[in-house]
Amino acid sequence: MAENMKDVSDDTFESVVLESDTPVLIDFWATWCAPCKAIAPTLEELAKDYDGKVKIVKMNVDDNPSTPGKYGVRGIPTLILFKGGEIVDQLVGAIPKAQIKDLVEKGL
């Protein structure tokens, strides 16, 4: 995992995501999910590109079932952008980098 990305859990979600001063893009993923692995390098690149402006974090849905359930995550990968503790937008599936970048830009 990129040094600019960190894992969050059900326990740390509120402090890392909802209470963040900067927008946060969270990637709901699982180790067995091929589309999740496909977009991982793109998320790592964007984490570097937007370092200090937007936090990009990952949550393993198998290890942390509470938060994905609360936010209606039914398919993975699901990317949800939070700003000020509120959902700005979300995308589901292995989408192209341009679409993920557009999502990130909504938080700025």
Image (tube, rainbow, N blue to C red):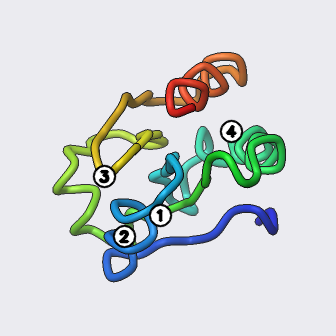
Q: Within 10 angstroms of label 4, few (less than 14), some, or many (20 or more) residues? A: some
Mark 2 and mark 1: Cα distance apart in space: 9 Å
Residue 43 percent coordinates (x, y): 70, 44
Labels 3 & 2 near each other (Cβ < 8 A):
no
Q: Is residue 26 above or below residue 67?
A: above
Quarter of the N terminus within the rendering? bottom right
Quarter of the C terminus within the rendering? top right
Residue 24 percent coordinates (x, y): 50, 50
On the image, numbered disc 1 is attached to which residue? 59
* Front: mark 3 or 2: 3
Residue 57 falls left or right of residue 38: left
Dot 3: element: loop
Q: Within 10 angstroms of label 2, few (less than 14), some, or many (20 or more) residues? A: some
Which residue is rendered at x = 43% and y = 43% of the image? 76
On the image, numbered disc 3 is attached to which residue? 85
Please report whichever mark, 3 or 2, sits nearer to the chain's N-terminal start.
Answer: 2
Amino acid identity at mark 3: Gly
* Front: mark 1 or 3: 3
Mark 3 and mark 2: Cα distance apart in space: 11 Å
Please report whichever mark, 2 or 4, sits nearer to the chain's N-terminal start.
Answer: 2
Which one is nearer the viewer's eye here, 96 or 107? Answer: 107
Amino acid identity at mark 1: Met
Mark 1 and mark 3: Cα distance apart in space: 17 Å
* Front: mark 2 or 4: 2
**Residue 39: mark:** 4
Mark 2 and mark 4: Cα distance apart in space: 21 Å
Residue 3 percent coordinates (x, y): 81, 68
Labels 1 & 4 near each other (Cβ < 8 A):
no
Labels 3 & 4 near each other (Cβ < 8 A):
no
Labels 2 & 1 near each other (Cβ < 8 A):
yes
On the image, numbered disc 2 is attached to which residue? 13
Please report whichever mark, 1 or 3, sits nearer to the chain's N-terminal start.
Answer: 1
